Amino acid sequence: MIHPDVRRRFPGLEDRAYLDTATKAVPPAEALAALRAEVDAWAAGTADHGRWEAAAERARDLVALLLGREPHDVALVSSHVAAASTIARAWPDASVVVPEAEFRSNLLPWLSGRERVRLVPSPATTDALCAAVDGGTDLVAVSSVQSADGLRVDLPRLVAHAHSRGALVYVDASQSLGADATLARCGADFIAAVAYKWLLGARGAAFLAVRPEHQGRFTPVLTGPESSRDIADGVKYGAGYRLWDDARRFDQPRAWLSWIATAASLELLTGYRPADLDGHATALAARFRDGADELGMTPAPRDVPSAITAVACADPPAAVARLRAAGVHAAAREGALRFAFHLYNTDDDVDRALAALRTDGPN
C-alpha cells in the first residue's frame, strides 16, 4: 500500500496536481540532494568520478530487481533509441510487427533500412497484436503502455503467443517500468526503458535487459571501453579487448550526473512492491476515467488497466494551458488530453483535475 505521506518526499508538488509523468517524472528530494552535492563537488574540483560510476552500477542492481533479472543481464545505455537500435541492427532482416502509433523512439529504429515491417493500426490491443503475429514473424516490438493514450497490453499473453510462433519480443517499458508488476514475469526477450519517466530518474540514463540465451548472439552497435571486460582490470589503452560475455557488452559511456540522480530515485522506488505501485497508479487512473466519463468526456480505448489515460479534446494545447492555470499538469497528445498517475499522486489530484475539467471543460 502507498501511504499518502510519500508526497512529502516530493516537496515541489505541494501546490499542484502533477499528472504528466508520461512526459517526465518529478524527482524525490533524495535525488535532488544527491545531485546537488555532486554538482557542488564538481564545481569545487573535488568530485570523484569513481563515485559516479558506482552510482550507475547501483542503478543497474536496482533495475535488475524490478525486472527479476541478474544485474549482469542489464546493460546501461544512454537512451531508448540506443537500446532499440542495438536490437534492430542485430536482426536487420527480421520480419517485425510493431504498432503504427508507437512513439517514434520505438518505431523508427525498426523501420530504418528494413523491408519487412507489419504496422498494426490503432488501437493496437493485445488481441490485435496477437492476430498480426504469424509463422512468418521474427520479432514483435511493442510498448508496454502506449505513450499517446495509455493503452496497455497484456504482455505475458502477447509474449507467450509470439514465442509459440517462433518470434522474439522487444518491449519498450519506458511508460511503465517503475510501476508495473507484470514486466518481471512477462518473459520478453528484450526489455528497455528510460530512467526519466516512471523510474523517477534523469534523462541520459536508460536500461536494456537481454535474456541470457541471446547475449552472445550479437555484438554491440557502439563498442567502447564499457563494452570490454578489460575495464574491470583498469585497462584504458591499447587495441586488444574482450567483450563482456553478458549484457554488459552493450554498455555505453555514462552521462555521469544522470546516474547520480537516477540511483538515488531508484533507492526510494524499490522500497515499494511493484504490485503496490501498479495497483496505486492504475486505481487512480481508473477513478479519473470514471469521473471523466461522468462529465461526458470520451476516454481512449482500454485493454489492461493502465496508469495513463486520455480523453478526447478539440483543442488539447489550449486545454493544457487552462488546466495548468488551475494547478493541474497534463499533456496534449494526438487530439487528446493525457493524464498519468504515479507514486506521488493521490485521490486529491484526481479530484482537482476533474474539478478543473468540470469548470472549464476540455474543449
Image (spheres, rainbow, N blue to C red):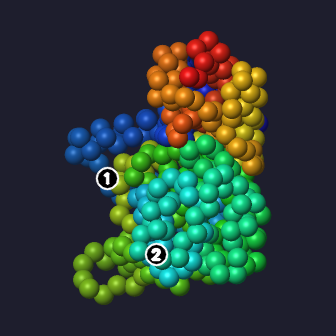
Residue 48 tag number: 1
Rendering quarter of residue 229: bottom left
Residue shown at 42% from the left, 48% from the top: 203
Residue shown at 55% from the left, 53% from the top: 101
* Pair 2/1: label in front: 2
* Rendering coords of residue 91 (x, y %): 50, 80
Is 330 in front, or is 7? Answer: 330
* Distance Cα–Cα, label 2 vs label 1: 44 Å
Rendering quarter of residue 135: bottom right
Left or right: where does residue 277 sit relative to residue 84? right
* Rendering coords of residue 357 (x, y %): 62, 19
In the rendered image, the quadrant that contains the C terminus is top right
Q: Is residue 105 visible?
A: yes
Is 214 above or below relative to 152?
below
Residue shown at 63% from the left, 44% from the top: 150
Left or right: where does residue 41 sit relative to residue 34? left
Tell which residue pokes out farthest to the top in this image.
359
Is 351 in front, or is 249? Answer: 351
Rendering quarter of residue 134: bottom right
Q: Is residue 215 visible?
A: no
Lower sequence index among marks 2 and 1: 1
Is 232 in front, or is 318? Answer: 318
Is 224 in front, or is 51? Answer: 224
Provide the secondary structure element on which disc 2 rests. loop
Provide the secondary structure element on which disc 1 rests. loop
Is 59 above or below relative to 74?
above
Residue 206 tag number: none
Name the residue tied to disc 2. Answer: 114
* Rendering coords of residue 244 (x, y %): 46, 79
In the rendered image, the quadrant that contains the N terminus is top right
Residue shown at 76% from the left, 77% from the top: 164
Tell which residue pokes out farthest to the bottom in this image.
240
